[in-house]
Image: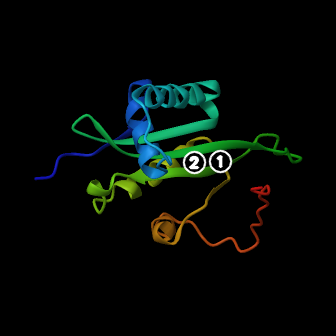
Amino acid sequence: MEPEVEIRVATPADAAGLAELKLAMSPPDAPLADWERALFAHDLVSWIAVDPDSRVCLVAVIDDQVVGMAWLVVFSRAPNIGALRRLTGDVQSVFVRPEFRGRGIASRLVDGLLDAARARDIGRVSVSSNAAGASLYRRAGFEEAPLLLEWRADSD
């Protein structure tokens, strides 16, 4: 029998696990020293703490190990007449350790973020996905947005 997966809001105690997941998701070019990993974990917790209402981080935990994460970053939009409080969300950094994939963990994380968006009356949530992840988001109700345009600063 597979161990139970707990999906919950991240706490400061999850910082080291979140840092390891972020590093596994986007590995640095060179190995990191222990102090660099610890500093990165501290920076993640500090980033969440700066404005906790604008960030939701969910974790998937198995046997006290953080095995997955998903982030919802909330942005305030310009008000409209009759709608002074307008929010939009962006799903970011959904990642499950490879050895725990195929168990529906990512789906549960994304569903949890969408529940958080509904609870905050967020009218629109977007996600930038690679081809491998697109079906996950489609199953959760995301649709193609062909008119979404993007500007990127020159990498020079």
- Judging depth in this view, the residue of 153 and 54 nearest the camera is 153
Does residue 115 appear left or right of residue 24 in this picture? right
- Amino acid, disc 2: Arg
Q: Residues within 10 Å of mark 1 (few under 14, many from 20)?
A: some
Does residue 124 appear left or right of residue 118 in this picture? right
- Amino acid, disc 1: Ile
Residue at x-position 29% and y-position 63%: 102
Picture quadrant where residue 55 is located: top right
Query: Which residue is disc 2 drawn over?
Result: 118
Query: Which residue is disc 1 drawn over?
Result: 122
Q: Which mark is residue 24?
A: none
**Secondary structure category for the residue under label 1:** loop
Does residue 90 appear left or right of residue 97 in this picture? right
Q: Residues within 10 Å of mark 2 (few under 14, many from 20)?
A: few
Residue at x-position 52% and y-position 45%: 71
| Quadrant of the frame with the C terminus | bottom right
Q: Residue furthest front?
A: 30
Q: How many numbered discs? A: 2
Percent across and percent down for residue 127 are 60, 59
Residue at x-position 34% and y-position 54%: 105
Residue at x-position 46% and y-position 70%: 132
Image color mode: rainbow
Q: Is residue 136 above or below residue 87?
A: below
Marks 2/1 in contact by CB < 8 Å: the verdict is yes
Percent across and percent down for residue 95 are 43, 52
- Judging depth in this view, the residue of 82 and 63 nearest the camera is 63
Percent across and percent down for residue 106 are 39, 56
Percent across and percent down for residue 137 are 50, 65
Give the Cα separation between the discs numbered 2 and 1: 6 Å
